[in-house]
Amino acid sequence: MWTSLPRLSWVLALVAVACHPSGPPEPTFDRLAAQELVRALSDDALGGRLPGSPGHAVAQRLIIERFEALGVAPFEGRYRHPFRYGGVGFGADVIPRREQKAGTNLMGWIEGRSDSDSILIITAHYDHVGSVGGEVYNGADDNASGVAGLLAIADHFSQHDPKHDVLLVAVDAEEEGLAGARALIDDPILPRDRIVMNLNLDMISRNDRPVLYASGTSHWPFLGPLVEEVALTAPVALERGFDSSRDEDDWTLQSDHAVFYRAGIPHLYLGVADHADYHGPDDVFEKIDLDWFGRSLTTVILLASALDQALPELAPPPSSAP
Ligand SMILES: [Zn+2]
């Protein structure tokens, strides 16, 4: 019955968080830097960040510079995780391709202060769909905003050491069948056995309904109380949903968290409901409500911190035969 141990340890850790009077430290991050990163990544000059394009290469440099500025270490000695992809994948926007393409995930590493082996992997894709009919699809909300969230978490954890090791990945080629996340999980560079949780951010800056949704708890019910606890103090409405056939839409397979879900790794996905400018030329920085976005970033950090506090130790492997 060793397989039930992780669930039990989660429950105990969640109870510990709920009972801890002071809780994790207040979210600390440079809000202006987060805004500026969204503005830069979604600038017309980057042409919509299509993998392989010059603007996409600029996006890579901007993200690595931000890792460096925050003192976030490269993972296994490098920020870049190159991969090749092609063919048909799974996901909402699968684009079959005959030719092989090159992609590059970007990885940062923050060492935890405990001696736990558990890793929290946080993901946000930085690619977008490029230009269509001569118009730049800027992808400010999708997903420059999530990348800014990833780096806001990095900002916070670089000032308040997390308990556990945190792997931060700006994922490539999400728009092309989740190719970057699939390449990462298939690569032996990733210590899969140590990954106990994926938090994925995709579109977190604007919403017709001012709600940030946490999707995933119907698959991982033991995470429900943690989300509810964070929602009590979050500065935006944080609601669970969009993760079962009973919802108006099921996002379980619609962004990079799907790859972790399919690998049996618990996940939470934070995002907004689709808006009229989704995958269009008007997904621009100017349409972001900066006040709401700032509060959304604070909420993202609160959730990442709560997960870090609650992460279980790895269950012992089944005792090997003498
Ligand atoms: Zn997206």
Image: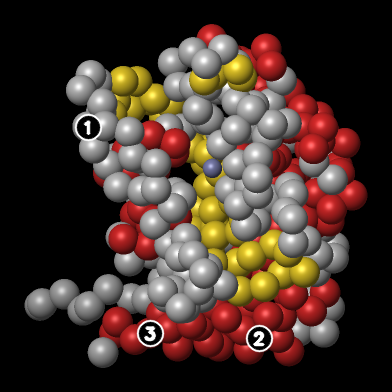
- Front residue (pair 280, 308): 280
The picture quadrant where one finds residue 240 is bottom right
Q: Secondary structure at mark 1?
A: loop
**Mark found first going from the N terminus, 3 or 2:** 3
Residue 187: image x %, image y %?
29, 40
Quadrant for ligand 1 reads top right
Amino acid under disc 3: Leu
Measured along the vertical axis of the image, is residue 91 above or below residue 210?
Answer: above
Residue 303's quadrant in the figure? bottom right
Give x and y (percent) for residue 20. Answer: 76, 84
The residue identified by callout 2 is 16
- Sequence order check: which comes first, mark 1 or mark 2? 2
- Quarter of the image containing the C terminus? bottom left
Is label 2 in a helix, a strand or a loop? helix
Residue at 30% x, 47% y: name it: 90
Q: What secondary structure is marked by label 3? A: helix
- Foreground residue, 291 or 157? 291
Q: Residues within 10 Å of mark 1 (few under 14, many from 20)?
A: some
Task: Measuring from the top left, give residue 182's x and y in whole percent.
Answer: 33, 43
Characterize the local packing of mark 3: few (<14), some (14-19) or many (20 or more) Cα atoms within 10 angstroms: some
Q: What mark, if any, has residue 87 been given in the picture?
A: 1
Q: Name the side, left or right, on which 252 lies relative to 303.
A: left
Mark whose residue sits in front, 1 or 3: 1
Foreground mark, 1 or 2, reads 1
Dot 2 amino acid type = Ala
Depicted 35 relative to depicted 297: above or below: above
**Distance (Cα) linking label 1 and label 3:** 39 Å
Against 33, residue 265 (above or below) is: below
Q: Spatial distance from mark 1 to mark 2, Cα to Cα?
A: 46 Å
Q: Which mark is residue 5?
A: 3
At x 65%, y 61%, the residue is: 304
